[in-house]
Image: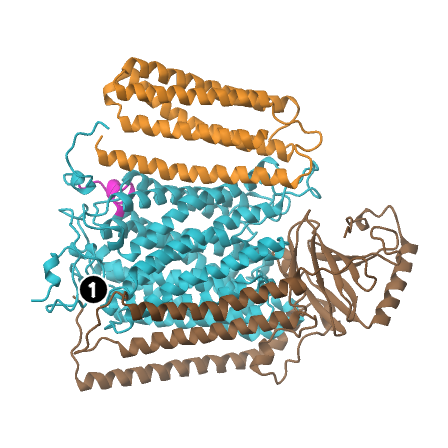
């Protein structure tokens, strides 16, 4: 090409003189910002807002199951005046649909991937910003637009989407779900999906191109690995979802029959409702890995940081996460065992699904190996990291029941599935998100979150949560199927009322405990203990600069000399951690 | 443009093309599955698209890609004049392609077939329609290169020309796949 | 920088006291919650259930377990198995649960013990290793293999065995002992069609029932299932397996029942607003009772057959 520079292909030196001016107006600083740190915070507030709405919906759902026929406390009479405050059955179907949709696409994804992906990637790899800052800004505002559309859908005349977050035809067709609710739902998620792809392109390109000199892929914190693999899955599989949604949208709005079968379509040609399920789950299974991979990466790092020991089996952990990423689309059929799949497909999906548990086992053991013989500091981020390990273990083991076709055909669409996916996808991701927040909050805001409140938040979250979802698995095994407004219609489920009541109490406890967290954030942002550059005494690159960092992050692009987990090195006597930029000689004896 | 920006832009293009590829792959798969599921395809009473039009369209877009490739080679060799006219040719052929798609779909419309009339016509509309929509994006890129070449050639970076070309060839290759799936 | 407290005996003691106090508080709290709930619930439960269960058939078909004097396990156990393969599925579920639970205990125990044993304290240093030593890799690899053999392989093996021995082993349609039933759920009822005495489906003597599936004890019931509108889930908890009902696609499923009585059939796939009360009953009769029911109803259906009744004329080619 025409380039005549004599630089090595060291992109950072090419970027050395590129320090952008500090934005000055309110709009350019906080609204239309190209700074990844500001965009991260935008995603954080966005995610917290929606997480609250999603959580409130879950409280309402559990209320119906714990106190059937009773008016919802405090706000019930305002929202449901026509039924004296009692949540009606049709609203119930909207509640669980929107709860799932909101939590996955508007809470966990924006927080773990939008916020922490944006905040951490440039800082941890030693870059000044994402490689495409405009694209980054756009990805937030497109997500926001999706949020506006979804919010609007809650107030349309025939109500919000009520077909389950999985949106299966033919229930999702206009004939059985008329009105704007589900159509707007499809539009909203199309927007959010596009934003995710934009973000994915940014993350992948940034990690490939903007790592500081000396940082190979094997010197990256595992947090970055997790975010990288998530981005790859996003880039490849959201388009598959988009395709499914587009076809469903056409069916709803333009009268096509892609998912309508001959028996009920007008023209005698045979569409296929099951095709939708294939398309949805080819995305859907990678999606669950998209949600958890950032948390896996972060936990792998946090365990090392707070045990003051290198991450055990770093390469194997990174490769296991990669293996799972590669295999993720091949196991999707385990969501469809009851649809009459052929014997060949059933066997193949069972086998592959059980195989994918092997790499998870590898990094689980590596996590234990990391804290083994460590010197563990139980600060709040560490508590949450350990909590993630605990709950993901519990959830992951129950995945085995669901991966084998035979037991799957017993447990499909029961609360066993609900308990399983909440543990793995919701709890582990949520706890990972909390761990990340407590850990990086000081870097974001320059102040520490209150430790004591953090610990109270931890215990008052994890104990009830474990109870809630274990209880749900018990209910599922007892035969309670899911997405039902009133299980006590069935004689064989009437004995489950006490269980559902206990779960309801636990839900209330967890819900209110989160206000501790919110209060902690609001208070500590301005009044928390000043953090300093490196409160956790960790060697990764973000802790070599001030808290919060200047808008350009690094005055000089760092040159990386070590991996991210060089703790308690025997060749070093002055302290138990080593920054990634310290000279090599610091680790030699004498 | 520095080598860094060049590599970054190329990476952007590659990942974006992977995403688009998955999108179209999904639609092609759906079409094939619909075909496999129905014993008679197109269904009784439904006319297939005119394969002559489709072959013609394929020829147009292939020629367009060839011309643009020629333009790129000329650009790198310093032959600005050839680059200009080849790009213009590719650009005109792009419009011709869009017209040919309109004609192809028009052939279906003349027989009362539309997006919603039956699943075969619906699938064809989706494949052709979605491809054309993305092609319009590619056309935007071609227009950019064309305008630069004609009005301020010194500000056109080779990377921009290259990436527009990649995307254009990608759309052409996609069309070949769509054509094969629809006609065979 | 986070301050670490230096160790003194006082601080150590205060930590123990704190832990004990918190545990007592916790246990007390849990006990309080349970006690409170029991108080409220025993008064409320019967009342609540009486209010909400307005379905009269719920009273006449008393299939629930006796709520008095139940142990925890009785209360939360699934309904009894009545199919010949239900126990096999149960066995696999329980094996997976126990083995999984054992691994979970190991994990939880390891987390707890490692957290305590290797907690940060003055004079204690971490051991520097990247986990690349031969013995370290050997231990993790062995544990992985153990997990694989005791769980994954067992699950895959038994799934194949189950699949071959009952899931895919559909009954012979030509065997007169096999009871053939077409199942057509719609929003929000279950339609069932029997071939009638002529043995042919879609003829005048077909027995069509709504929300009532009558079957004989001990004989295979071969169902073909297709939905009239949206996807439903055909699930009889006492049988232990389920199959989806899809519009336009026929799915096949068989079961049997080795005990007479009434059992609930539920819809296990979201199908709209009243999905939650889309209930049907499986009535298992002694063989002679079933045969007389069948004959009686088939004759009656043939006599009452009305070709103008379009709603009644649903069905498909049974095929093989």
Q: Is residue A329 above or below residue A457?
A: above
Which residue sits at x=83%, y=71%? C287
Q: Chain of mark 1?
A: A
Q: Quadrant of residue A364?
A: bottom left
> Disc 1 marks which residue?
A536
Q: How is the image coloured?
A: by chain
The range drawn in magenta is: A22-36
In the rendered image, is residue A546 in sight?
A: no
**Mark 1 element type:** loop
Viewer-side residue, A577 vs A197: A577
Q: Is residue A31 magenta?
A: yes
Shade of chain C as shown in the rendered figure: brown
Which residue sits at x=44%, y=60%? A425
Percent from the top left, x then y, of residue A43? 34, 50
Task: Spot the residue most to the right.
Answer: C303
Which residue sits at x=16%, y=66%? C1
Q: Is residue A55 left or right of residue C69?
A: left
Crowding at mark 1 (Cα within 10 Å: few <14, some 14-19, many 20+): some
Chain painted in orange in the figure: B
Q: Is residue C42 above or below residue B136?
A: below
In the rendered image, is residue A422 in sight?
A: yes
Task: Spot the residue most to the front.
Answer: C134
Shade of chain A as shown in the rendered figure: cyan
Q: Is residue B36 magenta?
A: no
Percent from the top left, x then y, of residue C290? 84, 68
């Amino acid at each position: 090409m025409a380039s005549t520079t004599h630089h090595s292909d060291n992109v950072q030196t090419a970027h050395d003189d590129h320090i952008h001016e500090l934005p000055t107006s309110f709009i350019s600083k906080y609204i239309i910002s190209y700074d990844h740190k500001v965009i991260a915070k935008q995603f954080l507030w966005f995610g917290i807002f929606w997480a609250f709405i999603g959580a409130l919906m879950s409280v309402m759902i559990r209320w119906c199951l714990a106190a059937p026929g009773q008016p919802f406390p405090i706000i019930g009479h305002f929202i449901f005046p026509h039924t004296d405050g009692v949540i009606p059955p049709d609203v119930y179907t909207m509640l669980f649909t929107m709860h799932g949709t909101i939590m996955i696409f508007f809470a966990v994804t924006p927080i773990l991937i939008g916020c922490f992906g944006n905040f951490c990637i440039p800082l941890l790899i030693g870059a000044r910003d994402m490689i495409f800052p405009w694209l980054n800004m756009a990805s937030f505002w497109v997500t926001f637009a999706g949020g506006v559309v979804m919010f609007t859908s809650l107030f349309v005349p025939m109500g919000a989407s009520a077909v389950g977050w999985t949106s299966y035809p033919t229930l999702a067709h206009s004939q059985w779900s008329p009105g704007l609710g589900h159509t707007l739902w499809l539009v909203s998620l199309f927007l959010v999906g596009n934003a995710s792809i934009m973000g994915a392109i940014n993350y992948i390109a940034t990690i490939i191109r903007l790592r500081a000199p000396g940082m190979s892929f094997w010197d990256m914190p595992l947090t970055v690995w997790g975010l990288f693999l998530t981005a790859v899955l996003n880039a490849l599989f959201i388009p598959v979802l988009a395709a499914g949604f587009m076809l469903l949208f056409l069916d709803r709005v333009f009268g096509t029959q892609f998912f309508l079968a001959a028996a009920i379509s007008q023209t005698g040609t045979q569409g296929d409702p099951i095709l939708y399920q294939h398309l949805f789950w080819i995305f859907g299974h990678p999606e669950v890995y998209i949600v958890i991979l950032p948390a896996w990466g972060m936990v792998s790092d946090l365990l090392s940081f707070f045990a003051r020991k290198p991450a055990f089996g770093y390469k194997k952990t990174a490769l296991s996460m990669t293996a799972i990423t590669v295999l993720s689309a091949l196991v999707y059929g385990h969501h469809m065992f009851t649809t009459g799949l052929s014997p060949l497909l059933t066997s193949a999906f069972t086998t592959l699904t059980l195989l994918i548990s092997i790499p998870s086992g590898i990094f689980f053991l590596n996590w234990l190996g990391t804290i083994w013989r460590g010197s563990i500091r139980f600060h709040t981020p560490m508590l949450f990291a350990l909590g993630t390990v605990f709950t993901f273990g519990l959830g992951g083991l129950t995945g085995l029941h669901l991966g084998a076709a035979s037991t799957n055909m017993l447990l499909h669409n029961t609360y066993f599935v609900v308990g399983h996916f909440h543990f793995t996808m919701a709890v582990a991701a949520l706890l990972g998100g909390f761990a990340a927040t407590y850990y990086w909050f000081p870097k974001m805001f320059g102040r520490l979150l209150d430790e004591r409140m953090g610990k109270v938040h931890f215990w008052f979250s994890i104990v009830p949560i474990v109870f809630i979802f274990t209880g749900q698995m018990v209910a599922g095994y007892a035969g309670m199927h899911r997405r039902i407004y009133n299980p006590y219609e069935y004689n064989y489920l009437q004995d489950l009322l006490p269980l559902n009541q206990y779960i309801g109490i636990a839900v209330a406890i967890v819900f209110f405990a989160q206000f501790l967290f919110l209060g902690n954030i609001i208070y500590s942002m301005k009044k928390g203990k000043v953090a300093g550059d490196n409160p956790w005494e960790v060697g990764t690159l973000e802790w070599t600069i001030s808290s919060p960092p200047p808008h350009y992050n690094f005055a000089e692009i760092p040159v990386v000399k070590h991996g991210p987990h060089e703790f308690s090195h025997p060749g070093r006597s002055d302290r138990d951690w080593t920054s990634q930029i310290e000279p090599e000689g610091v680790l030699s004896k004498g | 443009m520095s080598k860094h920006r060049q590599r970054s832009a190329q990476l952007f293009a590659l990942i974006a093309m992977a995403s688009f590829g998955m999108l179209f792959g999904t639609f092609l798969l759906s079409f094939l599955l619909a075909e496999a599921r129905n014993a008679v395809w197109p269904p009784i009473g439904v006319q297939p698209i005119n394969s002559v039009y489709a072959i013609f369209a394929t020829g147009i877009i292939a020629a367009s890609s060839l011309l643009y490739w020629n333009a790129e080679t000329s650009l790198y060799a310093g032959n600005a004049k050839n680059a200009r006219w080849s790009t213009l040719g590719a650009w005109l052929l792009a419009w011709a392609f869009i017209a040919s798609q309109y004609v192809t779909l028009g052939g279906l419309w003349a027989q009362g077939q539309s997006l919603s009339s039956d699943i075969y016509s619906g699938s064809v509309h989706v494949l052709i329609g979605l491809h054309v929509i993305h092609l319009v994006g590619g056309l935007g890129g071609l227009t950019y290169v064309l305008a630069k070449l004609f009005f301020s050639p010194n500000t056109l970076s080779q990377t921009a020309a290259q990436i527009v070309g990649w995307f254009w060839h990608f759309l052409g290759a996609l069309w070949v796949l769509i054509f094969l799936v629809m006609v065979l | 920088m986070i301050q670490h407290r230096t160790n003194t005996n006082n601080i150590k003691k205060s930590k123990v006291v704190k832990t004990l106090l918190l545990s007592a508080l916790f246990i007390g709290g849990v006990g309080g919650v349970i006690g409170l709930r029991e108080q409220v619930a025993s008064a409320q439960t019967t009342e609540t259930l009486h209010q909400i269960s307005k379905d009269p058939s719920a009273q006449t078909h008393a299939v629930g377990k006796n709520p008095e004097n139940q142990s925890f396990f009785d209360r939360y156990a699934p309904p009894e198995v009545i199919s010949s393969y239900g126990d096999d599925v149960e066995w696999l579920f329980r094996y997976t649960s126990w083995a999984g639970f054992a691994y979970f205990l190991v994990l939880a125990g390891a987390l707890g013990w490692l957290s305590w044993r290797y907690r940060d304290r003055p004079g204690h240093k971490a051991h520097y290793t990247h986990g690349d030593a031969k013995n370290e890799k050997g231990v993790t690899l062995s544990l992985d293999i153990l997990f694989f053999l005791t769980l994954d392989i067992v699950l895959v093996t038994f799934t194949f065995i189950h699949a071959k021995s009952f899931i895919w082993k559909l009954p012979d349609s030509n065997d007169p002992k096999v009871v053939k039933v077409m199942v057509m759920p719609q929003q929000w009822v279950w339609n069932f069609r029997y071939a009638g005495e002529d043995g042919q489906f879609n003829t005048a003597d077909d027995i069509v029932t709504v929300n009532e599936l009558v079957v004989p004890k001990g004989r295979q019931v071969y169902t073909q299932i297709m939905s009239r509108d949206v996807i439903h889930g055909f699930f009889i908890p006492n049988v232990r397996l389920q199959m989806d009902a899809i519009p336009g696609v026929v799915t096949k499923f068989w079961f049997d029942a080795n005990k007479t009585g009434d059992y609930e059939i539920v819809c296990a796939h979201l199908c709209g607003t009243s999905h939650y009360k889309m209930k049907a009953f499986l009535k298992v009769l002694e063989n002679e009772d079933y045969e007389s029911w069948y004959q009686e109803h088939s004759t009656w259906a043939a006599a009452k057959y009305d070709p103008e009744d379009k709603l009644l004329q649903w069905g498909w080619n049974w095929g093989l």
